[in-house]
Image: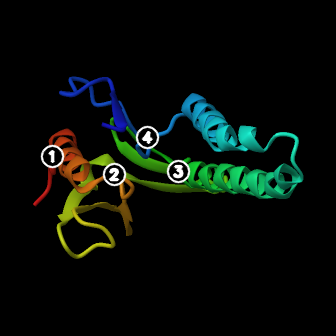
Amino acid sequence: MPYQWSPEPPHEKPDWELSLWPYRSLLRKDFVLFIGSTAAMVALPLIALLGTPVLWGLLPFFGIMLAAIWFALYVSYRRGEVLEELVVSEDRAQLVRHNPNGHVQEWEANRYWVSVHLHPNKGPVENYITLRGGDREVEIGAFLDPAERLALYDELKAALPVTYR
């Protein structure tokens, strides 16, 4: 799962932290390998054109294609650089979201008034999870897939038991 509890649940202490990030199927080192292997595979047929003027006509398109693939993967990777941290102490719960553009969003509430809500079909994504406390309701883990959000919801419900009602 693309999230980590610190310490691992069940939480014996009242202080704990949850870090969430989007799943990455292509790591940085794999990014370099992918670009290199793509360049090698596309360049292989060009070997037959060595020494001909046709090669010089195709090389700019080869370079543009590699640059476009690199740029598309780079933009995709940058958009996925999101980190959400939920820090819970004895009396406070704080959610901090680090966005790809460097903007930081923060939410804080009294731990004992924080409740976890699951919106199976009413949110922007399936199994949308929100935390409600204080004067606001905030989303958490919207970048996770629906099954991961369900698992996270169950773990959050256990970690943040509602003490009022």
Residue at screen point 15% across, 46% down: 154
| Residue 144: image tag | 2
Residue at screen point 60% across, 50% down: 73
**In what element is the residue under mark 3?**
loop
The kind of residue on which mark 4 rests is: Ser
Q: Quadrant of the C terminus?
A: bottom left
Q: Of label 1 and label 4, which has the lower sequence position?
A: 4
Q: Is residue 89 visible?
A: no
Instruction: Indicate whether 64 appears above or below 11.
Output: below
Residue at screen point 24% across, 66% down: 126
Q: Which residue is mark 4?
A: 25
Instruction: Indicate whether 136 appears above or below 81.
Output: below
| Residue 80: image tag | 3
Of 129 and 74, the residue lying toward us: 74
Distance (Cα) linking label 1 and label 3: 25 Å
Of 32 and 2, the residue lying toward us: 32
Distance (Cα) linking label 1 and label 4: 25 Å
| Residue 114: image tag | none
Q: Which residue is mark 1?
A: 154
Distance (Cα) linking label 4 and label 3: 11 Å
